[in-house]
Amino acid sequence: MVGQGTLSLCSKALTLAGGDAVALLLFAAAGRINHGGVLDWETGLTALPFLLGWFATAPFLGGFGPEAQGSKVPAATLVAAKCWAVATPLGLVLRGLSKGYVPPTPFIIVSFVATAVLLLGWRAAAAATTKEDPSQSPVVSAASRKNKQGNPLEFLSLLKNLTTRW
């Protein structure tokens, strides 16, 4: 039997994967429209090398792990940036291999910038709107630690040390 926590983690990972796919499809769609293309099945083919690059690397770099699924924006964005830094060059290589030529420099630059804005922006927004897991809150983690047993005079010693530093 699968636990509720496992289902929650799985649904969060699927949500992230779906958002990642949408971000990369938006990148391809914007490029095709900007160059006079239309939105058709070719848009998917344009995005395919980047989708393959992303989904081939992100799972191994923590792209769908606990930090990526969490509510801490800096941590989630950093994980996404790691994945992006590996997946985007791989996507460009796959695109070059599929087209039979090295992509032009402006395309490479635009690909890096656009995918960074879309993927990192999406991941930051996802983290910002994720509710904090109650089991990870500071109150719960503090309560789960054992209370320190000490001498009541330790407080006075600590207070004395603090005031002498001032």
Image: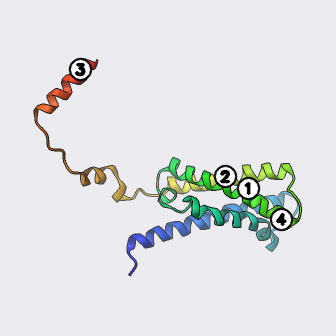
Mark 4 touches mark 1? (CB < 8 Å): no
Query: Residue 53 placed where, x, y %?
Result: 70, 63
Mark 2 or mark 3, earlier in chain: 2
For the point 61% across and 56% down, the residue is 122
Q: Quadrant of residue 97?
A: bottom right
Residue 93 in the figure: left or right of residue 146 = right
Q: Please determine whether, in this image, residue 148 is positioned above or below residue 137.
A: above
- In the picture of the structure, the residue carrying the numbered disc 3 is 163
Q: Is residue 60 visible?
A: yes
Query: For numbered disc 2, what is the local secondary structure?
Result: helix
- In the picture of the structure, the residue carrying the numbered disc 4 is 97
Q: Is residue 121 visible?
A: no
Nearest-to-viewer mark from 3 and 1: 1
**Could you give the CA–CA distance between mark 3 and mark 1, rounded to whole angstroms?**
56 Å
Image mark for residue 89 = 1
Q: Nearer the viewer, residue 71 or 145?
A: 145
For the point 21% across and 51% down, the residue is 146
Query: For numbered disc 1, what is the local secondary structure?
Result: helix
User: Which amino acid type corresponds to the residue marked 4 in the rendered image?
Assistant: Leu
Image mark for residue 85 = 2
**Could you give the CA–CA distance between mark 2 and mark 3, rounded to whole angstroms?**
49 Å
Mark 3 touches mark 4? (CB < 8 Å): no
Query: Residue 22 placed where, x, y %?
Result: 66, 65
Mark 2 touches mark 1? (CB < 8 Å): yes
Q: Nearer the viewer, residue 32 or 150?
A: 150
**Could you give the CA–CA distance between mark 3 and mark 4, rounded to whole angstroms?**
68 Å
